[in-house]
Every structure is written in structure tokens, then in C-alpha cells.
Image (cartoon, rainbow, N blue to C red):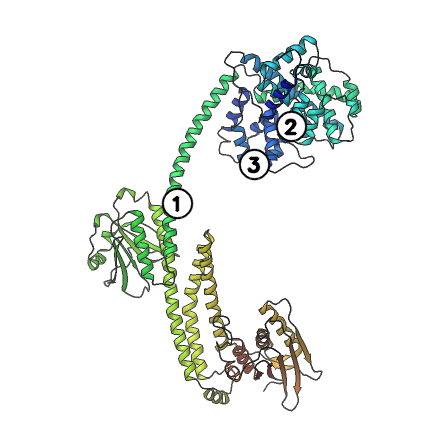
């Protein structure tokens, strides 16, 4: 100190020290208890903090204040009545709390040997803070249910935070303040003002604001020495300050700890009355306070005689555990690096594989990358699809730059895969199971080190891979990685195989359909239709089409399901955006092909109609609703008019609803905004005993050539790839099955009229 009384420079220096203070230190005894509890056998790996750790945090101002400050730093905050250490732990989570606890500063003794006096003053100050906290919490319980015990406790625990800070950063000055206050039997507040030019209430307020403590606690730190008569009970913050003031007086009266003030507490009953507390209630609080304070002090280990040695022992144990944890993490890190490199191998293979290419080329790509990644010798990969053939292709990779594809013939009786790996993964000696293969390939291979593993997909093998292992001791070490890599390779190869088969079937399907379409003439269709006695009889060309569609559907649906399922499986764990997009396209295209097959089957072999007398108005209403669902339009302009004399029609209502909805959808497509208008009129023709339904639109219309082709399957006036062209053809097929007719009138730019004639009675 420059002199007996403070000057402006002294005050500025002290305020600067406080602004640079990031937090309070803990005593060695607290550190010993804390680290021992954190590294207990039950808590080191637990997601929850043990109760003993929470009790230590709640009992120590440095730790409790740090957690309250962290809540603000993390942008979490408290709500009214929500302020407590346990709520702070819930908000922050165990991991953040553990990190904060391990980073807590621990007081160490000074080199000049006065550590004992410092620790003694600190323990007494801590005991006083705990006593005020326990007392303030109990006062809140008595005063009102609306006053939070937890808030009162924390406000009392932290009320002398500035004194703890003084003792930490300016211990000699704090010791002088305490000595002078004791000699003069005065309050530390007065001595601080004389010596420092500022007292602990102002410094504490600034620390509370600097550490972003809750506002109620900041007010209690600042105002707990103000005359209670000057504090209003109607303001929550000042009411808490009055509670802490009363608690401070009671704790000093009971001689619990030492705050550094030696003046006699006054007006305790008067302050209690101002808070609505009776004398008997105050006495009960006094009587129970000592036991509560003792429990808290024991949790912190304030009574441990050799606290520093205990702390060092706990620190040594913690260091030993950290060393073991570090070794475990190091091993896990090595495993993660190995897994990561395998992921890179798989990723490169997936990105470089053409799913629409040849399966054997995809196999070559996989075999080359297998050899490169695992640093093996010669690699042989062969595919066994289709299983009915004894002849198949194999890839031989001798070096990364030297590979070839050969055709292999399996002898009769030779197993394409060794027994035991047809449906489960294992690593076998290739020399015992693939001698016939080596004879045909003429490769330089150390048979003693050659291994064979299956390429399994969905519990079945699509092939196998044989490789010369240069490091035999690595077989079991890499078993899981071999299995994972082989599984991914098999999955992709199976997709390529299925895609290739689908491509071949599609080409064959298209060729057959073109041939049928070219051979069919309208005259033949009309002639056969006139000779047909039953509506279920199909013209010969359509019968052939139906048989072809049924066979194609059977052959295509299985590989389509595999393709879609495998793509969905791969996309479930995919994080790469581009690969996710490609897999989504695969699923969507597979679904589109399946829908084409379904449409074709519905056209070629619709179910026999189940005709009943049905209201025309009901049919039209349902058709409009179905069209709205198909187009997913928010609004469509359709007007329906049904003449009063229109009788019921004798049809399969579900089929006619589907047919009319298809026509409505086509009409909507003729508009740019796909919303209409469309006018539908239903009239009776008594002479012919039929009902005519006219569907009129004012869309783009059609020329004569388009009208002629409009009812042909797969014809569409849209650009290629936009529509399947089954709408009108399917509609006409269903109407004719119900012994009705469809006529189309249209002009380019003048709209279209589709007239559907339906029978009124069965014939």
C-alpha cells in the first residue's frame, strides 16, 4: 500500500486486477475430493455425474459460480425460479461440466512458507459463505413458497465472492484488512473503503456482472450490507438481498466461519420481522444451521489435516488413470485410422464403378483396388451368375497395370464355390478348393499363400475372390475388414449384374413389342373384335402382347426389386451428397420401370368387368376426384352436367371411373397451367339405349395423325421421357371391355371432345 488511506491509483490498480480475474481458485482439499470423485470406478465412464461431485459443486463458491457463468457463455440462460446448480448441470451436460471441473485452478502454497495462514483464512471464509448460503435457503423456505430455496442458497454462497477474490489475488492486503478489522472491532467494509477506496460489495457486483451471474445474485452481492429498511420487499432482487443480509448476520452471530468483519450483528429480529419471520422461526433456523454447514464442509474436506498431500495423492491417481485412458484412446485411434483407410478403399471403388456397365469390368475394378489396398500378390475374381451355366468370366490381376479377362469352364462335378462359403463368410486356402481354376488360368501364384473368400449378397454368393496373401499373419487381423470389403463389392456387383439383365430384358421386350406393333393392322383388330362373342376374348396380337408382358414382368420385377432394395440400403448410410443423388435416381428409375410393366399388364389383361346398374353422376364425381389426386392439382375447373332423364348405366363402375379419369387427365394436360376448364355432359339416347358422356376441353387440340395414334399404347404427344402414353389407350380398353365405345374429335388449337358411350342394360 502507498499509505494509510487509498488514492485513485490504488483503486484503479485493484479494479484492473479484478477485471482480469477469470475465476476463483479452489482449495487443495476440495481438489482432492473432486478429482477422486470424478475418477471413481463408477463415474469415469458414466454419462451422469455422481451425487458426490454435485454436492462438492453446490458447496464451493468457485465451482458453483463457474457453472452459473458457463450457462450464460453457452447461450442457455435461466428462467425465473430456475436458478440452481443442478439445473445448470442439466443445461450444460456432463461432458461440459467435467471439462470445467478439470480446468479449475487449485491454490498452491507460497514459496515463503505462509501457506498455512492463507489456507486457514480461506477455509474460514468458505465456511462463512456456506453458512450464509444454508441460512439464506432456509429463510426463503420460511418467508414464502414463491421464494426459491436454491436461489437463496446460491445468493448466500456467493455473497462474499469479492473477499474470496481479494484473498486470491492480493493475499497480503486481505490479511491486513482482516487484522485491522479485528483490532478495531469493526466491519471489513469500512476498512476496505479506507485502505482500498472501494469495498467488496462494489467489487463483487462488478465480478458478478463480468461473469454474467444471474441478476438476482448480483443484487444480493451488491446490497447485502444495506440497511434492510431501505430495501423493498416488493422487488424480487432486493428481497433476496435482504434475505442474504439477515443470513449473514445469523451466521456471524452463530460463529460459523469468519468473514473478516468483527463488528457485532444487530437488529436480527427486526430484519426478520420485515420479512415476515417470527422469533421462534428464527431460532429454529439458528438451531439447525450448524449441522447443515458441517455436512457441506465435510463434502469439501475442509477438516482434512493434510489437505495438500491428499490433493497430490488424488492428482497422482488421476494422472495414472489419464495415462491408461490415453493408451486406450491411442489404440482406438489406430483402429479408427485403419477403419478410415478401409472406408477410403470402399469409397474409391463405389465412385469409380459404372453401375450401367459390364459386371466383369466392375469386378476388374474391385480386384485391382483389392490388390492395391491390401498389398497382395496376384488376384483372381470370378462371377457365377447365371448359376445355370458352367462357363463364366474371370479377372486375373497380376499387377496394378496388368490385368486380363478370361473365360473359364467349370468341369462337371466341380463346385463353383468351396463348401462352407456358399452362404456365409470365411477365409479358406484356395489350393484345396480351386485347383481346376488354376489349371485353366496359367497364373504365377504361390498356392501355399493363396486364400479364397466369397462375394456374398443377401445370403447368396455372386462370385469369389482369390488373392495371394504376402503377410500370412494378417489373415485374422484383417478378417473383419476382408468381410466388409467383400460384402460391399458383392453388393455393387450384384447391382451391376441385375442392371445388365434388366437391360437385356428391356431390349428384348422392346423388340417384341415393335414386332407386334408392326404386324398388327387395324383391319385385323376390327375383324377379330367383331367375331368375338365374349368381351374377355382378346385379339390375337393383344393376346401375344399379354403373354409377353406377363413373362417380362416376371423376369423384370425380381431384378428391379433387388436394384431398388440395394440402392435404398446403400443410401441409408451415405453422407456424400452426389452419391446420395445417384442412388436416389436408381430407386426412382427402378420404380418407373415397374410402373411401366404394371401399366402394360393392366392394358393387356384387365380384370373381367363386374357390371351393375350405377348412377352416371356418381361415376363422374368419382372420376373427377381421382383425376384431381393423379394430377395433384390444387385447383381444377371442371363443370359437370347430367340431364334429368339420364338412366343408370350397366358397367363395372370402378373400370369406367378409371377410364374417364384418364381422359380428364389428358384434357388437363392440354392446358399450359393444367387447370382447365373442362365441361362434362351426360345425355341419354333412348333410340340406342345408351348414355353418352362428352368430355370437352379448350386445350391445344390434336391433328388427324395424333388422333389416329392417340389410343395406341405408349404413344404420347409429349417429348420423350415425359409421359408413358397409356392414358387414352387404357381408357379405351376399359370402355370396350364394358361394351362401350370411345370417339375423339379435335382440331389443333380448337380443343378436343371425347365421347364415351355406355350401355344402359346388359346384353
In which quadrant of the rendered view does residue 331 lie? Answer: top left
Q: Which mark is residue 340?
A: 1
Note whether residue 28 is visible: yes
Tag 1, which secondary structure? helix
The tag earlier along the polypeptide, 1 or 2, is 2
The tag earlier along the polypeptide, 3 or 2, is 3
Q: Which mark is residue 93?
A: 3
Mark closer to the observer (1, 2): 2
Name the residue at 73% across, 13% down. Answer: 264
Tag 2, which secondary structure? helix
* Category of crowding for the residue at label 2, using alpha-carbon neighbours closer than 10 angstroms: few (below 14), some (14–19), many (at least 20): many
Note whether residue 420 is visible: no
| Residue at the farthest bottom position | 687
* Category of crowding for the residue at label 3, using alpha-carbon neighbours closer than 10 angstroms: few (below 14), some (14–19), many (at least 20): some
Residue 148, above or below 619: above
Residue receiving disc 2: 208
The answer to whether residue 155 is left or right of residue 281 is left
Question: Measured from the top left, where is residue 95 in percent x and y?
Answer: 53, 35
Question: Measured from the top left, where is residue 8 in percent x and y?
Answer: 65, 19
Question: Measured from the top left, where is residue 499 in percent x and y?
Answer: 39, 64
Tell me the CA gap for discs 1 and 2.
47 Å
Tag 3, which secondary structure? loop
Tell me the CA gap for discs 1 and 3.
29 Å
Amino acid at each position: 500500500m502507498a499509505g494509510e488511506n487509498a488514492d485513485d491509483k490504488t483503486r484503479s490498480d485493484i479494479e484492473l486486477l479484478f477485471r482480469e480475474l477469470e475465476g476463483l481458485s479452489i482449495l487443495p482439499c476440495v481438489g482432492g475430493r473432486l478429482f477422486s470423485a470424478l475418477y471413481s470406478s463408477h463415474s469415469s465412464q458414466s454419462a451422469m455425474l455422481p451425487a458426490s461431485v454435485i454436492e462438492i459443486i453446490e458447496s464451493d463458491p468457485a465451482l458453483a459460480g463457474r457453472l452459473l457463468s458457463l450457462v450464460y457463455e453457452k447461450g442457455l440462460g435461466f428462467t425465473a425460479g430456475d436458478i440452481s446448480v443442478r439445473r445448470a448441470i442439466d443445461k450444460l451436460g456432463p461432458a461440459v461440466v467435467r471439462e470445467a471441473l478439470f480446468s479449475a485452478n487449485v491454490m498452491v502454497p507460497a514459496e515463503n512458507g505462509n501457506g498455512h495462514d492463507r489456507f486457514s483464512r480461506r477455509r474460514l471464509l468458505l465456511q462463512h459463505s456456506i453458512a450464509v448460503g444454508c441460512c439464506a435457503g432456509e429463510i426463503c423456505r420460511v418467508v414464502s413458497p414463491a421464494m426459491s430455496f436454491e436461489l437463496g442458497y446460491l445468493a448466500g454462497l456467493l455473497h462474499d465472492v469479492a473477499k474470496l477474490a481479494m484473498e486470491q489475488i492480493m493475499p497480503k492486503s486481505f490479511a491486513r484488512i482482516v487484522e485491522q478489522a479485528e483490532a478495531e472491532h469493526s466491519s471489513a467494509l469500512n476498512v476496505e473503503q479506507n485502505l482500498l477506496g472501494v469495498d467488496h460489495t462494489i467489487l463483487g457486483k462488478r465480478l458478478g456482472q463480468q461473469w454474467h451471474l444471474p441478476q438476482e445474485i448480483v443484487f444480493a452481492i451488491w446490497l447485502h450490507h444495506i440497511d434492510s429498511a431501505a430495501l423493498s420487499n416488493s422487488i424480487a432482487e432486493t428481497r433476496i438481498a435482504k434475505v442474504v443480509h439477515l443470513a449473514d448476520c445469523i451466521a456471524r452471530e452463530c460463529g460459523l466461519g469468519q468473514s473478516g468483519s468483527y463488528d457485532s450483528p444487530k437488529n436480527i429480529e427486526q430484519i426478520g420481522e420485515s420479512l415476515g419471520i417470527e422469533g421462534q422461526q428464527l431460532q429454529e433456523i439458528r438451531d439447525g444451521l450448524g449441522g447443515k454447514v458441517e455436512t457441506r464442509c465435510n463434502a469439501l474436506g475442509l477438516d482434512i489435516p493434510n489437505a495438500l498431500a491428499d490433493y497430490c495423492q488424488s492428482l497422482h491417481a488421476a494422472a495414472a488413470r489419464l495415462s491408461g485412458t490415453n493408451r486406450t484412446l491411442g489404440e482406438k485411434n489406430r483402429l479408427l485410422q485403419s477403419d478410415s483407410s478401409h472406408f477410403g478403399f470402399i469409397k474409391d471403388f463405389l465412385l469409380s464403378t459404372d453401375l450401367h456397365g459390364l459386371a466383369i469390368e466392375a469386378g476388374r475394378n474391385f480386384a485391382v483396388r483389392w490388390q492395391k489396398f491390401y498389398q497382395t500378390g496376384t488376384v483372381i475374381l470370378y462371377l457365377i451368375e447365371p448359376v445355370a451355366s458352367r462357363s463364366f468370366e474371370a479377372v486375373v490381376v497380376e499387377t496394378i497395370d496388368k490385368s486380363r479377362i478370361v473365360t473359364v469352364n467349370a468341369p462337371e462335378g466341380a463346385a463353383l464355390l468351396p463348401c462352407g462359403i456358399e452362404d456365409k463368410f470365411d477365409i479358406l486356402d484356395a489350393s484345396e478348393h480351386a485347383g481346376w481354376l488354376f489349371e485353366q488360368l496359367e497364373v504365377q501364384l504361390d498356392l501355399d499363400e493363396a486364400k479364397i473368400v466369397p462375394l456374398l449378397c443377401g445370403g447368396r454368393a455372386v462370385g469369389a475372390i482369390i488373392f495371394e496373401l504376402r503377410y500370412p499373419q494378417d489373415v485374422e487381423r484383417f478378417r473383419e475388414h476382408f468381410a466388409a470389403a467383400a460384402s460391399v463389392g458383392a453388393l455393387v456387383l450384384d447391382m451391376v449384374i441385375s442392371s445388365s439383365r434388366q437391360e437385356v430384358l428391356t431390349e428384348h421386350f422392346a423388340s417384341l413389342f415393335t414386332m407386334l406393333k408392326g404386324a398388327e393392322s387395324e383391319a385385323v383388330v376390327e375383324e377379330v373384335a367383331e367375331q368375338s362373342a365374349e368381351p374377355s376374348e382378346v385379339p390375337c396380337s393383344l393376346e401375344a402382347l399379354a403373354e409377353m408382358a406377363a413373362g417380362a414382368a416376371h423376369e423384370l420385377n425380381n431384378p428391379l426389386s433387388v436394384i431398388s432394395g440395394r440402392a435404398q440400403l446403400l443410401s441409408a448410410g451415405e453422407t456424400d451428397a452426389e452419391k446420395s443423388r445417384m442412388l436416389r435416381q436408381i430407386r426412382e428409375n427402378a420404380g418407373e420401370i415397374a410402373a411401366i410393366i404394371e401399366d402394360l399388364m393392366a392394358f393387356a389383361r384387365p380384370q373381367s368387368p363386374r357390371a351393375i346398374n350405377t348412377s352416371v353422376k356418381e361415376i363422374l364425381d368419382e372420376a373427377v376426384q381421382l383425376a384431381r389426386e393423379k394430377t395433384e392439382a390444387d385447383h381444377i375447373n371442371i363443370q359437370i352436367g347430367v340431364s334429368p332423364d339420364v338412366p343408370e348405366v350397366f358397367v363395372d363402375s370402378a373400370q369406367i371411373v378409371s377410364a374417364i379419369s384418364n381422359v380428364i387427365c389428358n384434357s388437363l394436360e392440354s392446358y399450359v397451367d393444367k387447370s382447365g376448364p373442362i365441361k362434362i355432359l351426360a345425355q341419354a339416347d333412348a333410340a340406342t339405349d345408351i348414355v353418352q358422356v362428352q368430355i370437352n376441353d379448350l386445350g391445344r387440340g390434336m391433328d388427324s395423325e395424333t388422333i389416329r395414334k392417340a389410343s395406341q399404347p405408349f404413344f404420347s404427344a409429349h417429348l420423350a421421357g415425359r409421359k408413358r402414353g397409356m392414358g387414352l389407350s387404357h381408357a379405351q380398353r376399359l370402355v370396350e371391355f364394358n361394351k362401350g365405345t370411345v370417339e375423339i374429335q379435335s382440331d389443333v388449337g380448337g380443343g378436343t371432345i371425347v365421347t364415351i358411350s355406355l350401355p344402359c342394360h346388359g346384353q
